[in-house]
Amino acid sequence: MMNQRNILAAAFLTIVAVFLVFSALFMHPFGEPTSQAMDQYIIDNTVEETGANNGVTSVVFDYRGFDTLGEATVLFTAVASVVMLFRRLKK
Amino acid sequence: MKGMSSIVKTIANISFPIITIYGLYIIAHGHLTPGGGFQGGAIVASGLALLAVAHGTSWVESKVKEHDLSMLESLGALGFIGLAFLGLIMGGAFFSNFLADTSMLFGAIPVDGAANINTGGTLPLMNFAVGLKVIAGLFAIVLVMAIATNKEED
Amino acid sequence: MIANIPYLAVAGLIIIGLYTLLFKKNLIKMVIGITILESGVNLFLITLGYRMGSVAPIFTGNADNPVMSYPVPQALTLTSIVIGVAVLALMLTLVIHIYRHHGSLHVSKLGGDDQ
């Protein structure tokens, strides 16, 4: 139980846990984000420019459509890999 | 995996159209209410997985070939990229919304800030393409894993 | 300190995920630990875009202007959740193949030589 690997793992976990808890306590207060210019522009101009009522969908498909293209590529790669790994060779 | 008893099969047969219509509603109204392509696609894929669990893998394997699922998924991906390139040709920028505020297919103008189902621009078309891709992809994953773990019990 | 409870919940989820990944020897438990770690990161992305007393960023036809939360972090979290599903599918496929080849899910029974 107390061999070298477990001591090393416990030390690493303690360091990461202390770092996470301290940075959670010293972050900016919950509910007051710091930078507002980009999101305020999107909230003000969505209905005229895209004609949609859903702010999140207009960001996903219109203002930041390139990220959705990357996500569709990742999904396609994962499905192709899974189907390929289970293929039986037909004699 | 074998199928379940006939009570479970009957209830799954009743619930499957209701779940599919609910998922397609969330895909189609993605630009008006919370939702969109990915969320509605996950709902329809879980309805299909319910059908696969209730009736057994052999029954589903005889109805759906995984070759058709790959074709549907590729169709969805090609539709998505085709709409992006059409935005480059007709609008000037990649992914530009070339149908909004014009008089073409989905291009009505929202009245007083309230949009209806006709006003999205390219957004509803992209929702349909991504929804089709997610449905076919997630159901292909579930089907392939179920068939692969089924063959060990022979 | 009470005002920062969402950030403490994020720290708790990441610590639980890392503990499961470091100290458990079963392959399925390690996969579950990676999933809990991804849930913690997604929660952190969502809580960055909240304003006090705001509603969801859905526009209605009414003329009142409520305070709305930011839509960009929610869009990025959507992408992250889908990528998490794809990675989980690939991990479970590899676990199935390992079980077929070696006959056991315990980490110490895989692998060739131990010194």
Image (cartoon, rainbow, N blue to C red):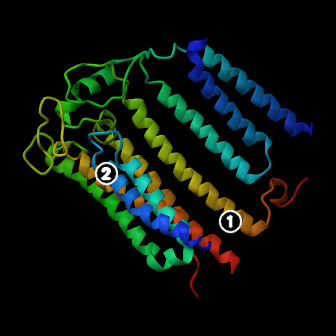
Question: In front: B14, or B20?
Answer: B14
- Give the labeled residue for mark 1: C97
Tell me which amino acid carries mark 1.
His
Q: Position of residue C73 (x, y in %)?
A: 42, 30
The residue at the point 20 percent across, 52 percent down is: B86
State which quadrant residue B53 falls in: bottom right
Residue A86, given in percent of the width and then of the height, sits at 58, 70
Q: Is residue A84 above or below residue C68?
A: below
Left or right? Give the position of A4 relative to A82: right
Q: Name the residue under label 2.
A: B25
Q: What residue type is labelled 2?
A: Tyr
**If the image is split into quadrants, where does the N terminus of chain C sit?**
top right
Position of residue C51 relative to residue B45, above or below, is above
Q: Which residue is drawn at 42% across and 47% down?
A: A71
On screen, residue B86 above or below B137:
above
* Classed neighbour count for the residue bearing mark 2: other residues with Cα under 10 Å, few (<14), some (14–19), many (≥20): some
Residue visible at 58% across and 66% down in the picture: B145
